[in-house]
Amino acid sequence: MFGLRAVASNVGGRLLQSLPFRGTHTQCISIKAGMDIPDNKSLEYALPYIHGIGRARARHILSELHMDNKLARDLTKREIVALGDELSKYIIGRELAAVVEKDVRRMIDIQSYRGIRHNDGLPCRGQRTKTNARTRKAGKRIPSGVRNK
């Protein structure tokens, strides 16, 4: 009786392994806590998946580590540790998001011009708002029947 149950569960597992699941699973390499990069891309293009790292900084990090630009899945454990140590020199990921949020909150609290614009949901770097700024003003649309003529 126990042998039949084991065979039945094994058949179910084999069926699940044989079914093709497309686009549901991506392989990632975890560099630090919460920082994953795709393993099917070269390092120069995989590192910008981390918030706060662009292509220029990715190139700079690779040159600091004297690494060639290879696929992320070809990294050794030693290279992953060295990459994590190099990334710890920068404010990236959740730390960067917290710093930016703190800076915006400070501007709002002191009622600076940029803080007021942030609070109102308007562009704060001098862009025009009469014809553009649709993404910043998206929630403030006036229905067409209410406008004054």
Image: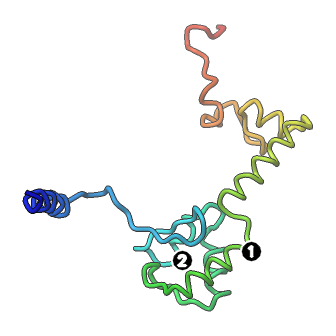
Give percent across and percent down for residue 89.
74, 74
Q: Mark 2–mark 1 contact, CB under 8 Å? A: no
Which residue is at a point 49% across and 87% down the rendered structure image?
Answer: 76
Q: Quadrant of the C terminus?
A: top right
Q: How far apart are marks 2 and 1 (CA)?
A: 18 Å
Q: Which of 40 and 136 is in front in this view?
A: 40
Q: Which of 59 and 96 is in front in this view?
A: 96
Which residue is at a point 18% across and 60% down the rendered structure image?
Answer: 13
Categorize mark 2 by other alpha carbons within 10 Å: few (<14), some (14-19), many (20+).
many
**Earlier residue among tags 2 and 1:** 2
The kind of residue on which mark 2 rests is Glu
Residue 75 vertical position relative to residue 105 in the rendered view, above or below: below
Q: Mark 2 points at which residue?
A: 44
Res 110 quadrant in image: top right
Res 15 quadrant in image: bottom left
Secondary element at tag 2: helix
Give percent across and percent down for residue 34.
58, 61
Give percent across and percent down for residue 35.
57, 65
Residue 67 vertical position relative to residue 104 in the rendered view, above or below: below
Which residue is at a point 83% across and 40% down the rendered structure image?
Answer: 114
Q: Which of 106 and 15 is in front in this view?
A: 15
Q: Residue 42 carries which label?
A: none
Which residue is at a point 43% across and 73% down the rendered structure image?
Answer: 39
**Seen in the image, is 9 located left or right of residue 77?**
left
Secondary element at tag 1: loop
Q: Which mark is residue 89?
A: 1
